[in-house]
Image: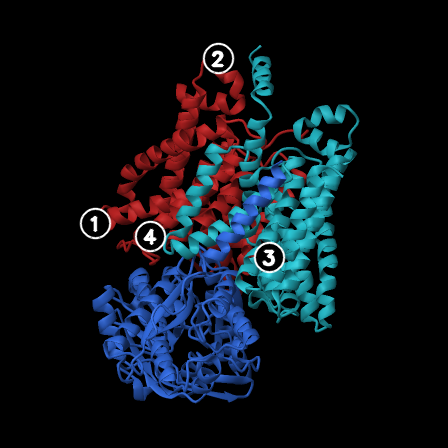
Amino acid sequence: MSPQLAGQIELLGQVLISGILLGGLYALIGLGMSLIMGVMKIINLAHGELMMVAMYMTYWAFTLWHVDPYVSLLIVCPLMFLLGVVIQKFLITPVMEAESILPQNQVLLTVGIGLVLANLALLLFTANYRSVPVSYASKTIYWDIKLGGQTISLSISYPFLTAFAIAVLLGTALFLFLGRTDTGRMIRATAQDKRAAALMGINTRKITYITFGIGAALVGAAGALLDPVYYLYPQIGGPFTNKAFVITILGGLGNIPGAVLGGLVLGLAESLGSVYISLGYKDAFGFIIFVLVLIFLPRGLLGKGRAQ
Amino acid sequence: MNRKTILVSAGLLLLAAFPLAVQNPYVLHLLIMTFLWVLLGQAWNLLGGFTGQISYGHAAFFGVGAYTTGILVKSGLSPATAWSGLLLGGLMAALIASVIGWICFRLRGPYFSLSVLALAEVLRLVAVNWKQLTNGAEGILYIPAFRSKAYYYWIILAIAALAFVVIRAVMRSKFGFYFLSIREDQDAAESLGVNTTRYKLYSLLISAFFTGVAGSFYMNYLGFIDPGIVFSISDISIMMILVTMLGGAATLAGPIVGAVLYILVSEFFRVWVKSGHLIFFGILIIFIIIFFPSGIVGTISQSRAGRKLRASAERKAAA
Amino acid sequence: MTTRRLFTLLAIGALCGLLVPAVPALAQVKTFTVGIPLPLTGAEAKFGEMEKQAYEMAVEEINVRGGVNGVKLALDIQDSGGKPETATAIVEKFITINKYPIVVGEYTSQCSYAVAGVCEKYNVPYLVVTGAADKITQQGWKNVFRLNPPASLYNLGVFSFFEQVAKPKTIAILYENTDFGNSTSKAMKDYCDSHGVQVVLSEGYQAGAVDFKPILQKVKSLRPDIIYMVSYLMDASLLMRQSKELDINPQAFIGGGAGHTLPEFLQNAAEASEYCMSATLWTPQVKYPGAKEFFDNFKKKFNKEADYHGAEAYAAAYVLADTLKRAKAATSDELRASLAATDTMTAFGPVKFVSWGQFSNQNKMDTLVLQVVNKKYETVWPAAASSAKFVYPVPRWRERK
């Protein structure tokens, strides 16, 4: 094998690894939004801001008490769950129940919440860029493969791998929760048909609190996992809200396995696209795939049947 | 002419005479921005409020309008061509809209909402990367034609008034009833023989046209655009929804109230509260949505419409 | 019905608009107020904040020493959110309502450019402090003066380093797709094209990406001598960290200023920042009078380190004081004339507005190259100004301790 070919294989391998690992994180961000979308039929435009809040929690836990970001998941997720419940109970539910011409005013409410959260963070923590300087931030596992007389050396980032593993764990836990527990089944029932669920005696109001709480906890977990490999500042939420958006659509709006697939597809599309097409258009690939999915698979990647 | 028409005309005349009395550029600037946002709110409202097709990406049409004019300016033609961009920008926006509408309106649900968002993002990236055409991230600068703000004031006031009149006329025509029927119950509309796909498209075309005109005016007036400004999700697309919904979606007056709130109140906060001014604005949004779920105009007119109506509706729903 | 209510509201709104600016422009006779738009919210807020603090510190110092000709300086700093639309509105208000005879500041190139257009329109002098895109001082505008060098000259120090030390054959360029990134990287590309350095890759990226590894892997496969990066913000540290992870070993990593010169870069990139070089306009080690004092006092006062953005703002306040001192009257015309005749020394370096080539009223200054040595920024080039010896080529990642 020629060195050039080996180089190309190495490039492709590295790009695939990066795409999948990043996709895992994206999936976690998308899962929360997808769940909320499925049950409440609203798009949570404060999703990225919730992640920002979790990132600051993790940051302060690390800075003040030297709590490792992965350990702080145990504190951050419950706190984010509570925050989600509070937002749903005191802000979103009253608006959902009020009569209005368009239901989209709930979406605007989340815009307002996002504005308040981001600017509160700006006021409290200043605009400084911060990072969680864990010792393993750029720790890397090298993996050398002998192939046809050439060495292909791949590298896997330790914090990205850990984040991916925890994302998989949390995703599995969510599936088990939704599939095996009563509350999980109630959430699914509410997502399918809210009125029917209410008629079956499900307290749908309580279910919406729990759903938003879980959504917030999931994106909170993503925030905590992102801290060691990324950085944070008050305005960080916006781009991630957009990503979550795309993932949710790719996955077929509220479809949970779809969101996982959507995250992976987005991660891979970004990394493959940036190398083989153009870095400048990297962020467009997700949208282009989305439009293609829309035209050819209107029910999302995992959807069955046709719309209408 | 009924009393209302006379009142509206008198109000418009008063507004038109305003720059004769007050020449302060800053005050005029705020009012120009308010009228611009009235126009944007009206445009979004026709599609979102009256027809029920929520768009999260109207910045796509705004940006196309702005860049149409920007590219005209950049090509070095006479300043008059910049103004021809008003019409051309609107038409370009409508053209792009017809493509996306043709793809998405066959489907129901949030697909349209989100594909316009995708469209806006893709167009933004095209504007950033296609440097020969758009100057890329550098943006396009143009020293505006008129020094006095009064001309811009009259132009945008006229356009906003025109949009108001057109949309009012549309909503009183056959089209308007079709639009409302699509929003209320698409199946029922279809079963009555309304070609919903086509009427949704009409609504979108009018809406995109006015949004494109607004974008083109923005370029003419402010004289500087770059992809991040005119294709912004948070500053254009979401704010168009905000302006409409705060004022009252599906009411003609709603976007006007919304634009006043958005431009004047947020400027008030920015100047007086200084640090953290956006928190106050965010709280204001939350407050309005909780206490005026149909927007200020919408909720007030709903409660005016009499408890009778609602009581009877409630009785029906309970039965 | 609702329409009438609406016009009432509109009228009230208009009134509010009238009342807002009804603040007296000059509270006291003996004060000179300067209007400064800055991004205090939004993505660039960090820099806006640093510049705000530097302006305030400088003005405080000037006023403690009795002000300028007995007149105290005051600042009217307003938040533009980094949006050209808001920045122009603020400046229009400064000029027409507050009647400030001069405008200073803004941060991004986009905002500075838009503000420059407004100032030119109203014939009010404008001192650009940070906006670096070349075109700002290439329009032949007589009211626009720029303290910082244009982006295309940020690399002058790097170029002389290339010619005298590095002599690279190949280079890969990664830049943020903004006005600043485009200008700076284009200058590098033009230099390389005309000096026989082969550009193996030149790609723009969107700021804020989480993972640069795919593109970095591509860079790795091209084996360039130099990897040159232009990053506004924290992308700089991600690029370095991920280069380390991928074990990319060029002769040197060189940044184009901004992101690679931030104190946060050292913290976030940690050991991955070691030996990274960057073009810069200023370091605390420069031998200009007051530079070190500025850095130390700033650190004492705000408990954080100032980078060249802070120095620019600090120097701008002194340039303004100098201009005011020499002006016959505090009018736009006199201040413009006085600004044009500026020839002063500041903590940021010598300031003199000259015109050459396409540039007009542009300060010309030497730019430096810094390198991270032992987790600290050291000035390494030009040799005369250096505080430490450069390390070139840099050791391979796996061979470092």
**Position of C375 compared to B305: left or right?**
left
Residue drawn at (70%, 38%), measured in percent from left and top?
B3
Q: Colour of chain A?
A: red
Q: Secondary structure under badge 2?
A: loop
Label 2 vs label 3: CA separation? Answer: 55 Å
Q: Amino acid at mark 1?
A: Leu
Instruction: Report the residue marked by disc 1.
Output: A64
Residue at mark 1 shares a chain with residue at mark 2? yes
Q: Chain of mark 4?
A: A
Q: Which quarter of the picture shows residue C244?
A: bottom left
Q: Which mark is residue A200?
A: 2
What x and y, as percent, mark residue B307?
Answer: 56, 21
Label 4 vs label 1: CA separation? Answer: 19 Å
Q: Amino acid at mark 3?
A: Ile
User: Is tag 1's residue or tag 2's residue first in the polypeptide sequence?
Assistant: 1
What x and y, as percent, mark residue C384?
Answer: 31, 89
Nearer the viewer's eye, disc 4 or disc 1?
4
Are discs 1 and 3 less than 8 Å apart at CB?
A: no
